[in-house]
């Protein structure tokens, strides 16, 4: 890494790079540690299960549940899946029109697939869950869900209409099953899952996080679009086959420790950028954007709630009495981050509701628990379109 004093320009640059790498690697490290804790039963989630099995929460959530944006009108079913040695067959029951959703989250916390009432319907079905590079495994006619990483999480939610409905929901939860493909085809005991890899035990203390990140990067490579971030990781030893953190030079150690501290401080700083909704609720709306500083919806739990993701998107609007024939906003030349007039999707929704004659910040609808919810929180219609 070529360590140097932190007081000079080169040292400061190295600390900045280490902070960027820490923020980049945070979702991977945090997510896989949570997965391992779920399997071991040592985390804060009120359920556990071995790899490739569902663990079910039988009661509705209360304020003590440490989970990302929990809701209390569904029961959760969670499975940590490891498909590196063989695919799994997912069986979903006929829910008779009842709402449910299975959210698929890869090792990097990217949502890559959904199965449920809105996406696939509520009929009974089987799906093959395969990892990257597995082709030709699916039984005839079975849909394939291909995961971008060999370990991923299924976060399931099944609608509950009050406490009296719980017994029926429990029966449906028990009908969601995961079966190794070899067992599905009639073979004997399957090979045990590989599990989440362990870091080099010789590395601990202040460098443990970096060693975990190195280990997880090797096991679950990021997408090719992340090449610029990987270049930074490479300079810090995160792509080395053998751990460079064993007996590391104290000056280089100091750079990584300072970078981790700065990266954590940046995450916590952004967590404090809180906006009040019209009803007086507070939320960190920035964390619900997909953006290149790697802070967005769904990963950082507990005292820090959010996720990490990358990219921008676009929308084509037409009709509805809006002013047409214009382009609003611009990105950099790679389409990676907005550089002029960033548009939040809440603004788009507020605009559409307004054109339908609804006040987006005052009109409410009731959720399944009977609580009023605003159509749009904290966003106004786009002035360019009205």
Image (tube, rainbow, N blue to C red):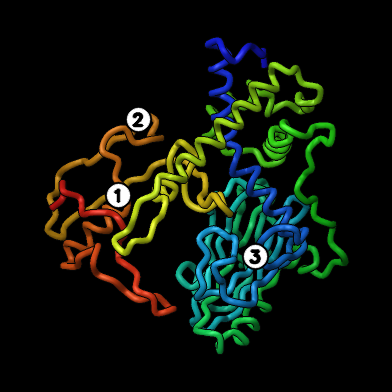
Q: Earlier in the sequence, mark 1 or mark 2?
A: 1
Q: Nearer the viewer, residue 241 or 357?
A: 357
Q: Nearer the viewer, residue 289 or 7?
A: 7
Q: Quadrant of the N terminus?
A: top right
* Residue 300 appears left or right of 256: left
**Would you name the residue on which mark 1 appears?**
315
* Residue 289 appears left or right of 385: right
**Quadrant of residue 381 within the rendered picture:** bottom left
Mark 1–mark 2 distance (CA, rounded to whole Å): 17 Å
**How dense is the environment of label 3, judged by Cα within 10 Å: few (below 14), some, or many (20 and up)?**
many
Residue at the image point whose x is 67% and y is 63% from the top? 79
**Would you name the residue on which mark 3 appears?**
78
* Residue 136 appears left or right of 315: right
**How dense is the environment of label 2, judged by Cα within 10 Å: few (below 14), some, or many (20 and up)?**
few
Residue at the image point whose x is 55% and y is 85% from the top? 163
Mark 3–mark 1 distance (CA, rounded to whole Å): 33 Å
Residue at the image point whose x is 53% and y is 23% from the top? 16
Q: Position of residue 76 (x, y in %)?
A: 60, 70
**Quadrant of residue 241 within the rendered picture:** top right
Whether residues under marks 3 and 1 lie with C-beta atoms below 8 angstroms apart, the answer is no
Q: Position of residue 355 (x, y in %)?
A: 16, 62
Q: Is disc 2 placed on a helix, strand or loop? A: loop
Q: Is disc 1 placed on a helix, strand or loop? A: loop
User: Against 93, is 128 above or below?
Assistant: above
Q: Is disc 3 placed on a helix, strand or loop? A: strand
Q: Earlier in the sequence, mark 2 or mark 3?
A: 3
Q: Position of residue 196 (x, y in %)?
A: 75, 48
**Would you name the residue on which mark 2 appears?**
332
Q: Earlier in the sequence, mark 3 or mark 1?
A: 3
Q: Position of residue 44 (x, y in %)?
A: 67, 60
Please identify, in this view, whether the residue under mark 2 or under mark 3 is nearer the observer: 3
Mark 2–mark 3 distance (CA, rounded to whole Å): 38 Å
């Amino acid at each position: 890494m070529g360590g140097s004093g932190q007081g000079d320009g080169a040292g400061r640059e190295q600390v900045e790079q280490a902070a960027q790498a820490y923020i980049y690697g945070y979702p991977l490290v945090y997510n896989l540690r949570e997965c391992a804790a779920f399997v071991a039963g040592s985390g804060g989630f009120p359920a556990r299960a071995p790899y490739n099995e569902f663990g079910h929460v039988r009661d509705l959530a209360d304020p003590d549940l440490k989970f990302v944006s929990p809701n209390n009108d569904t029961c959760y079913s969670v499975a940590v899946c490891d498909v590196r040695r063989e695919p799994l067959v997912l069986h979903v029951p006929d829910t008779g029109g009842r709402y449910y959703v299975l959210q698929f989250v890869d090792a990097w916390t990217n949502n890559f697939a959904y199965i449920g009432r809105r996406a696939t319907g509520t009929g009974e079905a089987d799906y093959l869950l395969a990892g990257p590079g597995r082709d030709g495994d699916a039984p005839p006619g079975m849909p394939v869900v291909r995961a971008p990483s060999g370990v991923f999480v299924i976060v399931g939610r099944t609608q509950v209409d009050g406490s009296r409905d719980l017994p029926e929901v429990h029966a449906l939860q028990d009908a969601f099953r995961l079966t190794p493909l070899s067992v599905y085809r009639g073979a004997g005991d399957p090979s045990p899952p590989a599990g989440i890899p362990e870091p080099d035990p010789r590395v601990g203390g202040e460098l443990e996080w970096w060693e975990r990140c190195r280990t997880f990067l090797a096991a679950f490579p990021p997408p090719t679009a992340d090449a610029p971030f990987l270049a930074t990781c490479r300079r810090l030893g995160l792509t080395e086959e053998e751990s460079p953190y064993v007996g590391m030079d104290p000056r280089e150690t100091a750079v990584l420790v300072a970078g981790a501290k700065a990266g954590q401080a940046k995450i916590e700083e952004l967590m404090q950028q809180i906006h009040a909704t019209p009803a007086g609720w507070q939320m960190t709306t920035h964390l619900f954007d997909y953006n290149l500083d790697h802070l967005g919806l769904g990963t950082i739990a507990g005292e820090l709630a959010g996720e990490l993701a990358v990219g921008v998107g676009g929308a084509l609007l037409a009709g509805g009495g809006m002013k047409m024939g214009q382009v609003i906003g611009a990105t950099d030349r790679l389409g990676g981050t907005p550089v002029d007039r960033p548009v939040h999707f809440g603004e788009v929704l507020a605009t559409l509701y307004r054109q339908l004659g609804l006040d987006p910040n005052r009109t409410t609808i009731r959720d399944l628990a009977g609580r009023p919810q605003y159509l749009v929180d904290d966003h106004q219609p786009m002035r360019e379109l009205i």
